[in-house]
Amino acid sequence: MVRRELKLHFQALIAAFQFLTRFPIPITVPFQGSVLLRSVVYFPVAGAFIGICLLACTWLLALFVPAWPSAVLILAIWTALSGGLHLDGWMDTADGVLSHRSPERMLEIMKDSRVGAMGVIAAVLLLLLKASLLAELLRGDHFEQYGPLLVIVPIWSRAWMSAAIAWWPNARQGEGIAVLFNEVKWPQATASFVMAAILSVLTFWIAGTGTNVALIMLLIIVILTICCGGFIAAWLNRKLGGLTGDTYGAMNEAIEALLLLAAVIWLYAQ
């Protein structure tokens, strides 16, 4: 029994990486209920590895490249590491929701592989915002203080995805990516949040962040993640009658942008 459970958790970890990232992991795992149910617990781990790659690339670029070009390159790497999955969800969600049609028609628009004007506008604005925020955090000696956020931000944006899967219904009953995670409930979402908290504390500890500062920052991050994610999820649920795989990606992007914005506000408030 223990051996089987360990095997399922290992497969779940691999599934989380294969689902949320483009890291080349040459291991085949069954994308079925028992594995996917556990995989959401490891969403923050996938986010942490994305963040570690971003931090390493940022450190290298900072040696040779000014803040703004570095920010654009880091954002390109950030997008590539997830295969553009979440950005695509952001664009599809913008196309559907901003069409102001019936819920059924919005869902049809979101399924369309073509990107509309609203999706393009939303993507451009989001990327400009994230690039400008990254540029501010990379200026001067700010990177030493705020560098750990490059790891922590993708951890919590992906932890929220597990909560959204667990706490809101699927808008497309019987179809779409979201249906694969129908069995996910609050215990898995809670475990994902605990995993995110552990990874965040570990990141702050490795970075040498003071205990009081780390606790305050972690508390702010958790509150902002839950408030932003909860507001968007409730709004989308009201508009669409549930959530979809696209909306999970859209919330991931929104939370990442909000946490970066909060970091810049914190920076200028000091």
Image (cartoon, rainbow, N blue to C red):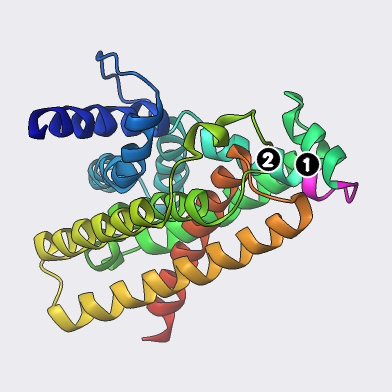
**Kind of residue at disc 2:** Met
Residue at the farthest bottom position: 270
SS label for mark 2: helix
Q: What is the spatial separation of the Cα atoms under label 1 and label 2, in whole angstroms? A: 6 Å
Relative side of 221 to 214, left or right: right
- Residue 257, horizontal then vertical, whole percent: 51, 58
At 42% across and 85% down in the image, what residue appears?
A: 269
Give the magenta-colored segment's residue range: 95-102
Horizontally, residue 183 falls left or right of residue 140, namely: right
How packed mark 1 is, by other alpha carbons closer than 10 Å (few <14, some 14-19, many 20 or more), is many
Q: Position of residue 68 (x, y in %)?
A: 46, 51
Q: Pointers 1 and 2 in contact (CB under 8 A)?
A: yes
The structure residue drawn at horizontal position 82% and vertical position 38%, both measured from the top left corner, is 117
Q: Residue at coordinates 17% horizontally, 34% vertically from top-left?
A: 5
In the depicted view, which residue is nearer to us: 218 or 124? 218
Q: Amino acid at mark 1?
A: Asp
- Residue 58 makes an appearance in the image: no
Residue 95 — which label? 1
- Residue 99 magenta-highlighted: yes
* Rendered position, 87 above or below 138: above
Disc 2: which residue:
91
The question of residue 78 being in magenta is answered with no
For the residue labelled by badge 1, is the local secondary structure a helix, a strand or a loop?
Answer: helix
Q: Position of residue 260 (x, y in %)?
A: 44, 63
